[in-house]
Amino acid sequence: MSATEFNAGLLDEFSDALWLEDGLSRNTLESYCSDLRQFSEWFAKKRWDDRALTAATHADLLEFLAYKVSIRVKASTTSRELSSLKRFYRFLLRQGKIEADPSLNIDTPKLPRGLPASLTEAEVEALLNVPDVEQPLGLRDRTMLEVMYASGLRVSELVNLEAAQVSLNMGVIRVMGKGGKERLAPLGEEALEWVIHYIKEARSMLLRGKVTNTLFVTARGSAMTRQAFWHLIKRHARLAGINKTLSPHTLRHAFATHLLNHGADLRVVQLLLGHADISTTQIYTHVARERLKQIHALHHPRG
């Protein structure tokens, strides 16, 4: 058997194992195999004496990654390729096909943190005004958008929010965040009014006699999924004429960015967002800084 056939057999075994163990999609499996085939081809050109992937060393993997950097492959691509190599060689080690994992102690390259998609205050206003609040579903949608923008909730926190977590008297939400950490998120007068309006006018109509603790319910009287809310935002954004690439957390990002634009302290924003580490919150300062630069360029005589 040639080294090429031997390597192809290893990749087939690896792919089968991933499919059986993790149930990964065809696209994900192909992504792993594509990364490994690239390494296999590079390794074959480098090692004419022994081209079997089981013979690759720690130095070989480092040289391959250095080669990728030299041809200006994006850091995100190199990071993914290293992840594929690590998983492949852990598999070979478990199968007893190698005695040591050559991918050990190779650090994943640090990726530049992308700025989160956000909206201007005018765009948020346009988005909030899209739902038809004369209809129960429209009133629900408007209230959900208002609450997310006013309190900076994560999508999962919003769709799983229970009525008992909202204090209408105090105007706050008791949020159970990541890791079971609890925080209080203020609603603000506008969002509070919409919540009261929704509870009085729409929620019981949507429930149709059903009983649930979930605050925001679908037309079937059940809790909404993250995916459903994501489609809801995209649909309303399209109707509002917003052509930006949005994420499920777009209004959460806008919440943080607009607070900083109006002078909020970074530590306060950290608490409101429920971030354990302030370094996670600091990315929003870059968004706010870009906005300040735009304002300066637009309005300053020397801009």
Image (spheres, helix red, strand yellow):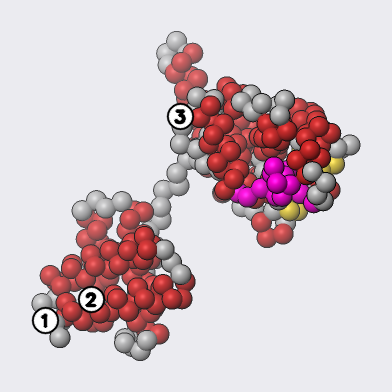
Label 3–label 2 contact, CB within 8 A: no
SS at circle 1 = loop
| Direction from residue 30 to residue 141 in the image, left or right | right
Which amino acid is tagged 2?
Ala
Between the residue at mark 3 and the residue at mark 2, the CA separation in whole angstroms equals 44 Å
Which amino acid is tagged 3?
Asn
Look at the magenta stretch and give its main secondary structure.
loop
| Direction from residue 69 to residue 23 in the image, left or right | right
Query: Hey, which residue is sitting farthest left in the picture?
Result: 48
Q: Nearer the viewer, residue 12 or 254?
A: 12
Q: Which mark is residue 8?
A: 2
**Crowd class of label 3 (few under 14; some 14 to 19; many from 20; radius 10 Å):** few
Between the residue at mark 3 and the residue at mark 1, the CA separation in whole angstroms equals 55 Å
SS at circle 2 = helix
Q: Nearer the viewer, residue 29 or 118?
A: 29
Residue ID for mark 3: 243
Task: Give the number of marks.
Answer: 3
* Residue at screen point 46% across, 36% down: 245
Residue ID for mark 1: 49
Which amino acid is tagged 1?
Asp
Q: Tag 2 or tag 1, which sits nearer the N-term?
A: 2
Q: Nearer the viewer, mark 3 or mark 1?
A: 3
The quadrant in which residue 82 appears is: bottom left
Question: What residue span does the magenta drawing correspond to?
Answer: 212-226
Label 1–label 2 contact, CB within 8 A: no
Relative height, residue 84 to residue 159 (above, below): below
> Is residue 303 on the magenta stretch?
no
Percent across and percent down for residue 1 are 15, 86
Percent across and percent down for residue 263 are 64, 29
Relative height, residue 302 to residue 57 (above, below): above
**Crowd class of label 2 (few under 14; some 14 to 19; many from 20; radius 10 Å):** some
| Direction from residue 134 to residue 73 in the image, left or right | left
